[in-house]
């Protein structure tokens, strides 16, 4: 099978490419510049701006693919020319969206693929909704072979899956309290990139996925307190101190977090993964967050240059705790 990745040299795209190659798929990746991560052995690279339809057409030279995956469609303008370009040139066009498209608070839990999509404020999710709607219209009106895939919060060894990142780890190791939004009990799901890749790759060339949207995530259920406590254990901190503050008060001290807390992280997100498991029989996550957290901390501790504390954020936490 021949698969084209538009972008896909980031965290989850590179994991998916490596898994695809492992399964014997011929993978071509199109990037404008040098990939941020090394491409898996056997992956072919073409140089082009995937948002420039003319340049992309020239780079592909009429080549056809069993599936095309767009990892870098963030606004409608990024995808507007793709139905015309790829209709007849591929059996499946996979648009990588996000589970952040679902309206908050979600009217009913667990979230399914048919849960309401609505995001009038949070720009990233709002634009992803607009991309989905544009491409769905082409599927309905022109038989464009669309599949929408929605990852949720995905991480690998290079990503500390909390807003405070290494600053939170540093504070834990110094015995300082770490601020967690709300009361720490809202529900969340984290997926290791390797688990995402194992769930995602079997969707490529899968005729049952045409015309469908699929939420691709582990389904592991964690509270935000559990996420921080698991990171603390991986960091060798046995008695971390967590302090809870409202999303509103945190946003006052850390304005850059306001939008993502208000419209994303503060809400419980519990998913029904029945459709994924029906399309990919036998899929089950292999990397628990405990294991994933140990992998993350081992990676960071192997390179002290990664131990970068955000001094402004550190001070903001002290102010939130009345200790500045």
Image: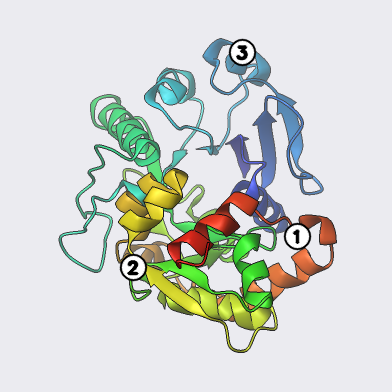
Discs 2, 1 touching: Cβ within 8 Å: no
According to the picture, the residue beneath numbered tag 3 turns out to be 55
Mark 1, other Cα within 10 Å: few <14 / some 14–19 / many ≥20: some
Could you tell which of marks 2 and 1 lies nearer the N-terminus? Answer: 2
The mark closer to the camera, 3 or 1, is 1
Residue found 76% across the figure and 72% down from its top:
298
Q: Is residue 13 above or below residue 177?
A: above
Q: Which residue is mark 1?
A: 307
Q: Secondary structure at mark 1?
A: loop
Give the distance between the C-alpha atoms of the residues marked 3 and 2, in whole angstroms: 47 Å
Q: Quadrant of residue 50?
A: top right
Q: Secondary structure at mark 2?
A: loop
Give the residue at x 59% y 15%.
Answer: 57
Q: Which-is-in-front pick, marks 3 and 2?
A: 2
Position of residue 98 in the picture relative to residue 21 (left or right): left
Sequence-first disc among 3 and 2: 3
Of the numbered discs 3 and 1, the one sitting upstream in the chain is 3
Q: Mark 3 and mark 1: span between their CA atoms?
A: 40 Å
Name the residue: 26% across, 61% down.
Answer: 112
Coordinates of residue 63 in the picture (x, y in percent): 63, 24
User: Would you call the spot at circle 3 few (<14 residues within 10 Å), some (14-19), or many (20 or more)?
Assistant: few
Cα separation between marks 2 and 1: 27 Å
Element assignment for label 3: helix
**Residue indicated by mark 2:** 182
**Residue 201, visible in the rendered structure:** yes
């Amino acid at each position: 099978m021949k698969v084209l990745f538009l972008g896909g040299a980031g965290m989850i795209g590179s994991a998916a490419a490596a898994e695809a190659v492992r399964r014997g798929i011929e993978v071509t990746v199109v990037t404008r510049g040098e990939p941020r991560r090394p491409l898996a052995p056997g992956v072919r690279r073409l140089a082009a701006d995937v948002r420039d339809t003319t340049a992309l057409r020239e780079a592909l030279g009429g080549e056809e693919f069993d599936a095309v995956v767009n990892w870098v469609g963030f606004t409608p303008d990024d995808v507007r020319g793709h139905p015309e370009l790829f209709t007849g040139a591929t059996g499946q066009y996979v648009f990588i969206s996000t589970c952040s498209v679902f309206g908050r608070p979600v009217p009913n839990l667990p979230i399914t693929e048919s849960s309401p999509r609505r995001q009038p404020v949070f720009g990233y999710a709002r634009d992803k909704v607009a991309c989905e709607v544009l491409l769905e219209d082409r599927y309905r009106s022109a038989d464009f072979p669309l599949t929408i895939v929605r990852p949720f919060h995905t991480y690998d060894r290079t990503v500390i899956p909390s807003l405070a990142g290494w600053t939170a780890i540093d504070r834990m190791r110094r015995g300082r309290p770490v601020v967690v939004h709300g009361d720490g009990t809202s529900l969340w799901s984290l997926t290791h990139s390797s688990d995402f890749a194992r769930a995602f790759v079997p969707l490529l060339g899968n005729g049952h996925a045409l015309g469908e949207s699929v939420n691709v995530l582990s389904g592991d259920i964690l509270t935000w307190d559990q996420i921080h406590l698991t990171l603390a254990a991986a960091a060798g901190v046995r008695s971390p101190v967590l302090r809870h503050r409202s999303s509103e008060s945190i946003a006052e001290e850390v304005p850059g977090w306001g939008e993502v807390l208000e419209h994303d992280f503060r809400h419980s997100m519990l998913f029904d993964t029945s459709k994924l498991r029906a399309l990919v029989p036998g899929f089950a996550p292999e990397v628990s967050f405990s294991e994933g957290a140990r992998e993350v901390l081992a990676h960071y501790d192997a390179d002290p240059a990664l131990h970068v504390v955000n001094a402004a954020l550190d001070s903001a936490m002290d102010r939130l705790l009345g200790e500045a």
